[in-house]
Amino acid sequence: MTKKLILFSSIFAFLIFLTGCQSLTVLDPKGPQAETTADVIMTSIWTMLIIVIVVFILLIVMLVKYRARNQADDYEPPYIKGNKWVEIICVGIPIIIVIFLSVITVKSTYEVEGKPKGYENDEPLVIYAASSNWKWHFSYPEENIETVNYVFIPTDRPIEFKLYAYGPIASFWVPQLAGQKYAMANMVNTLNLAATEPGEYMGRNASFTGEGFAEQTFNVTALPPADYQTWIEEIQATAEPLTEDKFNQLLEPGRLGQETYTGTHLEFSPPPTTHHGAKESDGTENTEQEMNDSMEDSMEN
Amino acid sequence: MEFFDRFAVPNPTFTIYASMVAIGLTMLAILVGITYFKKWGYLWREWLTTVDHKRIGIMYLISALLMLFRGGVDALMMRAQTAIPDNTFLNAQEYNEVFTTHGVVMILFMAMAFVMALMNFVTPLQIGARDVAFPRLNALSFWLYFMGAMLFNISFVIGGSPDSGWTSYFPLAGNEFSPSVGTNYYMLSIQIAGLGTLITGINFIVTILKMRAPGMTLMKMPMFTWSALITNLIIVFAFPVLTVALAMGTMDRLFGTHFFSIDNGGMDMLWANFFWVWGHPEVYILILPAFGIYSEIIPTFARRNLYGYKSMVISIVAISALSFLVWVHHFFTMGQGALVNSIFSISTMAIAVPTGVKIFNWLLTLWKGKIEFTTAMLYSVGFIPIFTIGGVTGVMLAMASADYQYHNTMFLVAHFHLVIIPGVVFAMIAGLFYWWPKMFGFMLNEKLGKASFWAIAVGVCLAFFPMFISGLDGQARRMYTYSESTGFGIWNMISFIGASMLAIGFILIVYNIYYSTRYASRDISSDPWNARSLEWATHSPVPDYNFAITPEVQSLEAFWDAKKKGHKLFKGNYKEIHMPNNSGVPFIMCCFFFLLGFALVFSMWVVAIIAAIGIFSCMAHRSLEQDHGHHISVEEITKTEEKLGGAKK
Amino acid sequence: MKVDHSQPLEYSTEQNRLNILGFWIFLGAEIALFATLFASYFLLRNGTGSGPSDGEVFVIDTLMIQTFLLLTSSFTIGLGVHAMRLGRKTATINFFIVTLLLGLGFVGVEIYEFTQYIDEGLTLQTSGFSSALFTLLGTHGAHVTFGLFWGSFIIYQLITRGLTPETANKSFIFSLYWHFLDVVWIFIFSFVYLKGMI
């Protein structure tokens, strides 16, 4: 019994520790999208903690109180069929909790899928992020530059990452700025984020892509707009141009350091034509919709 | 020589060569041993050709324990590799193979087999039947599973293990990115084992619907039988989806079709969708029987009836229906938009409601009880707190926006292990301890059993709680290593310690089996736990025909009421019993299946055609054969009953 | 073996009743299997890559012949089971033989149709569409082919053993299988061919 108590208290301590520990990457947001997800996570932890505590207390009470050793030898447990009210409570409370969490989920999901809060009216900076085994290629179509395995972004401006892949499904993830989204070969996904503070953030592919997966990381550096502009101009002035041959070399499976080029691969190796989640989507959105519809059909059969 | 090159392992290391030698020697030792002790005939007559559900159950059990060992070694290697930053114990390729085989072996060849073992052994006894509806098909199911498992396992030494994750997402699993034959093994071995599972599904639905003892209406069925019925219904509707997906994956890899390719109109997301349309129900295929086991054990040792039987039944039916409507939550991040994600978030969270009902019903079963802490009961009540944590984190993962941060991280790994281990593995061990005396006629040692419980329970918490933290700190899953600056080291070290404790716990269970086999008393009653359902009304170990007289059931807890209220279970006299004959055909047919799978893995078409002809010949043989089974005479029944300690009447 | 004479022959023993229920559940699994194949066909229908699309390859003649053959065979096997219920062994066997001959014709036309597709440059490897099409049609065709063998074994048993509870049970189950394939064909006819040709 004591061991159960130890177990219980250690889990409790663990959760307290968790809530106090704001240094965990995901819970240390530097932008509105990540802040929304961090808030949702904390709310759900607290809500779930209530359930966990109720279950633990009930369990401990039952186990201690109704233990055979604590009862008379001739005690014969009664036959109890069930009680309507108990069952209504057992169903009702979880339903209320689920409704509460559903509201939060729907609201926050729309929030993180849309433009970052507070920047709704700003013109977003579009950056194409393409995954290849085991690298990330970032193309800035407006600035006409391309980087490998690192990306600079301006703070206080919404960024629209257009994600796709050369090869296996990868998942673009900068935990302190926003949650993940898949980069896939046959369509372009859009990830919205914004950084409120300048700094260096860890980014990586979170979806397994084979041998070099563990090292498929990139750095995100958020700079104040003026510094960002200086950086752009510097690159435009100094970097080598990206040729098709060079790009095909970069696509070869393997691991690369950080590289910088002028020009982008978008001209000679354009991204897939199917777009998702983008407002200015070019009308091919129904592919996925159809897919889900007929999946549901097949389930009904 | 060129012909044999294909069988070489693409990434050979010392460990693999050592394993080859070890496997070779073990095989040789087994063959020599069987020959020396002249056991070939015994093996063939009593086991390879058996159609008895109890023996098939025991064979499933042995296979499950073997696979637990294989998957467990994989797990230990993974935890050892990640225990310290920048470790070089395994390289990336080896790590990828290890986590792939760990997942496949644990889910499909360990947990499924364990579920099948208990379902096979217990269900017919609980409903008072002589055997399952189609005993011959039951043997076929087992051998298909067994050959599938063997085919998967030889990949380690012949041709190379699969390395694209147990989910094998395309295009990663396609020829371009996974050129070795490993993924062929994955596709074909799961296909073969899956066929067996599908056949079991049909078999058990018919058995439970049609072969219950007189008087046992659906609402008088024990909870475990209910869960078996619903589980098998899920199997029948979910496994065909896997069959199709695997067939398409195989064709993409062997014949160059374009189902999941990224060019020529293929659709890579299609695999992920099909995989999880099967995969999520599969989770419930594992956990519902586990829920059934807890619903048997908790009332037995709380000495009280199961609280809210009707709501328990309704909740498993609800869970099974919802299980088909949530698959998208495995890839919220695929970009299907906020609307689709919201719908699937809500349907996923809805599963928490019936699951919650079950948890509260178990808690209320303890209420006013007289709780006895046997090993089986310890595992059952230990399940509740750990599973609750696993379950509530599942609700957290169901929230799409938050899942964008949890997806593909150690947080997810922590969640599903904290659901599957207390949910499925605890239940299987509890069931093992609980039904062991019925299977073998002696009990497992309680002291060692309890020690194993504490090692495993503490080990699970230590191994997986730290992953919540490292996940939230940004550690993605399936990373073979990480740098020291990430700060993940400490959490992974704790995980490794926990994993080692788990290993100790499992070794204690195996030792317990050995120890009890040698030393435990054979002189036990047929009802050592003072239990409540029909399987305890017959002898331990159970005679071939299960019940000398078919029991007649009047109430939900038929055996308990027979003991307490004096209901008469067995009326009338012994009558001749009709039993099915043994048959070697299922075993031979599955050898051909193994050969077919192996030939296809290496694209050896002639061998594949020969094997296919072998399979069809077995089917033709079955079609033409006239086998009406045999009868056990009244004298023989009387003799057996007396030998087993007096007639059960 | 207890034979219940108040029931039709195919239902007359306990094992027969189990077999029939088991086969219905098997057909449930088959429905899930074909539903998955249909789903993938619908999803991949537009994935023609550089190959031809459905409207370009489908021909009405072979489709009509196939449909006629299979629907008629479903009718004749129905007559076969009816004859079996009346206890008329020869009629049963004859109707089953006609059924299998029609089925054989169906498979023959289907193979001819496939060769036509290949001539037009649509092979299994052409595109997502072609893979899904050949797999859906091929799975159905393979079921029919399997049925031809299975049916022949049953006819052989009917000839040598006559109408017993066992052979009647097998024949009845085979008829369920055959009707099911017919139903699947109706779906293929409407949702693959007609949809593609419109």
Image (cartoon, coloured by chain):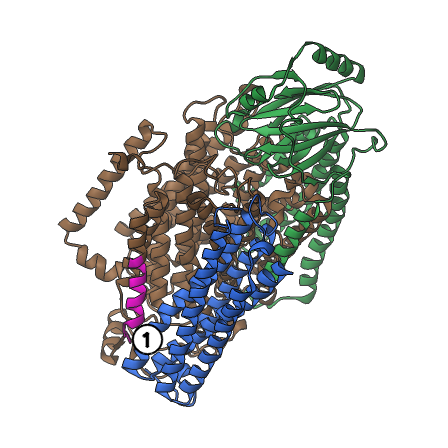
Which three-letter amino acid code belongs to the residue tagged 1? Ala
Which quarter shows the N terminus of chain B?
A: top left
Colour in which the image shows chain A: green
Q: Main secondary structure of the magenta part?
A: helix
Q: Is residue A85 above or below residue B61?
A: below
Q: Nearer the viewer, residue A193 or B613?
A: B613
Please indicate whether residue B90 sits to the left or right of residue A105 in the image: left
* Circle 1 SS class: loop
* Residue C43 at x, y percent in the picture: 60, 51
Q: Quadrant of residue A135?
A: top right
Q: Quadrant of residue B627?
A: bottom left
Density class for disc 1 (Cα within 10 Å; few <14, some 14-19, many ≥20) is many
Please indicate whether residue B498 sits to the left or right of residue A273 in the image: left
Q: Nearer the viewer, residue B561 or B589?
A: B589
Residue position for label 1: B548
* Residue B72 at x, y percent in the picture: 40, 40
* Residue B231 at x, y percent in the picture: 50, 60
Which residue sits furthest right?
A121
Chain with colour brown in the figure: B
Could one spot residue B372 in this view of the protein? no
Number of residue marks: 1
Q: Is residue B230 above or below residue B640?
A: above
- Residue B507 colored magenta? no
Chain with colour blue in the figure: C
- Residue B627 colored magenta? yes
Q: Quadrant of residue B550?
A: bottom left
Q: Is residue B570 above or below residue A87?
A: below
Magenta residues span B613-628
* Residue C161 at x, y percent in the picture: 28, 81
Q: Nearer the viewer, residue B519 or B598?
A: B598
Q: Is residue C15 above or below residue B469?
A: below
